[in-house]
Structures are given as structure tokens and as C-alpha cells.
């Protein structure tokens, strides 16, 4: 008669379980990194689409009035041909203001205005307003100066105004 002795019990050892948990953790971390990257790319794509939409509204305003949006404190519209190189305070921060010309013309500053060209200018995907700037420095990060008229968003780090840097999402209307 043979006696069978079983040395090993069925089941997993602690080390085997820890190895499986570590592998699952590594895979989960890799998936999370790719999801975060995809979300950032989607937000940038959404901002680019909204900037193009704002550009189209400004193009219609320009076609009708021969003017670009004006700041609410400006008496007259910004002439289309001018790049205000280095002129401080010419930015338009609230494109929804009806005096700017995109969503309204409350002060009748735009001759031949036939809007509104947009019902509302939405916030960018990071919750900040879009801007219109007639002296945006395209080479600021490189230490140079090349002025342009742009519509833009301050991008992912745009937690306030005047954060011009490489992550801005802009559409160049014209440049020098």
C-alpha cells in the first residue's frame, strides 16, 4: 500500500499574489497616463475649434464694418490694417461684451454692423475667456519680437491674463 504525501497545499503564495498586484498596478498607471494625455489633446483640439469659430465671427465683423473688435473703453473700432506693435492695454479680454462688436453693438461704434456674429463666446476648455490682441508677440519665448494680431486662449496654464507662453492656443489673423 502506497501512502501519498501532499507537500504543497492548493492556492497561491503571498509572493505570487504580490507579483500579480504589482503587474496590475503598472498596467493601471500606464492606462491613466494615456488617458490624461488624450484628455489634454482633446482640450487643445476643442480650443482650436473655438478659436476658429471666433475668427469666423471676427471675419464677418471685419467684412461688414472694416473693423476688428474694440475694447469696451475705446470710442472707435480698431482699424483692420493696424498692428499695434507693443502698445499696452489694447487687448480685448471679454469678447462677450456687446460693445466689442461680436455679440452686439450697444454703442453703435461700428458702421454697417450686421450682427450679432456669435450669440455667445464660450469660455475655453480650461474655464478662461478667449482674448483678441493686436500686439501679440509671436517670438516672446525666443527673446525676440514679431508682432501679430491674434485670437487666442492662454491654454492649460491660463489661470489669468497676460500669461503669454508656448502653450497658448492662438489663431494669427495677420503678422508683420
Image: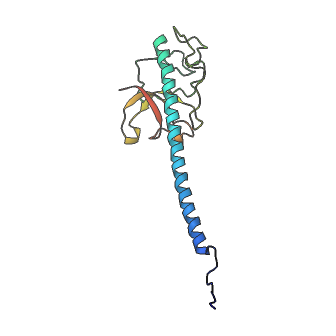
Q: Is residue 140 left or right of residue 18?
A: left
Q: Quadrant of the N terminus?
A: bottom right
Q: Quadrant of the C terminus?
A: top left
Q: Is residue 97 left or right of residue 165?
A: right
In depth, the one of 2 and 81 nearer the eye is: 2
- Residue at figure coordinates x 52%, y 29% from the top left: 50
| Name of the residue lying farthest toward the bottom | 1
- Residue at figure coordinates x 53%, y 38% from the top left: 43
- Residue at figure coordinates x 43%, y 17% from the top left: 80
| Name of the residue lying farthest toward the top | 112
Q: Position of residue 23 (x, y in %)?
A: 54, 63
Q: Position of residue 54 (x, y in %)?
A: 51, 24
In depth, the one of 70 and 5 nearer the eye is: 5
| 4 lies above or below 176 | below
Q: Position of residue 33 (x, y in %)?
A: 52, 52
Q: How many marks?
A: 0
| Name of the residue lying farthest toward the front | 1
Q: Position of residue 52 (x, y in %)?
A: 48, 26
Coloring basis for residues: rainbow
| 16 lies above or below 43 | below
| 12 lies above or below 60 | below
Q: Quadrant of residue 124?
A: top right
Amino acid at each position: 500500500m502506497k501512502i501519498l504525501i501532499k507537500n504543497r497545499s492548493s492556492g497561491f503564495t503571498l509572493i505570487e499574489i504580490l507579483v500579480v498586484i504589482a503587474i496590475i498596478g503598472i498596467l493601471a498607471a500606464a492606462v491613466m497616463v494615456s488617458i490624461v494625455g488624450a484628455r489634454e489633446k482633446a482640450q487643445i483640439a476643442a480650443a482650436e475649434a473655438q478659436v476658429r469659430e471666433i475668427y469666423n465671427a471676427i471675419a464677418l465683423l471685419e467684412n461688414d464694418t472694416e473693423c476688428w473688435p474694440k475694447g469696451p473703453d475705446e470710442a472707435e473700432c480698431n482699424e483692420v490694417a493696424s498692428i499695434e506693435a507693443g502698445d499696452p492695454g489694447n487687448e480685448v479680454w471679454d469678447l462677450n461684451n456687446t460693445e466689442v462688436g461680436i455679440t452686439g453693438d450697444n454703442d453703435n461704434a461700428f458702421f454697417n454692423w450686421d450682427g450679432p456674429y456669435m450669440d455667445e463666446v464660450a469660455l475655453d476648455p480650461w474655464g478662461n475667456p478667449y482674448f483678441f490682441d493686436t500686439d501679440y508677440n509671436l517670438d516672446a519665448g525666443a527673446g525676440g519680437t514679431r508682432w501679430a494680431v491674434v485670437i487666442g486662449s492662454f491654454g492649460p496654464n491660463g489661470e489669468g491674463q497676460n500669461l503669454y507662453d508656448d502653450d497658448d492656443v492662438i489663431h494669427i489673423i495677420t503678422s508683420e
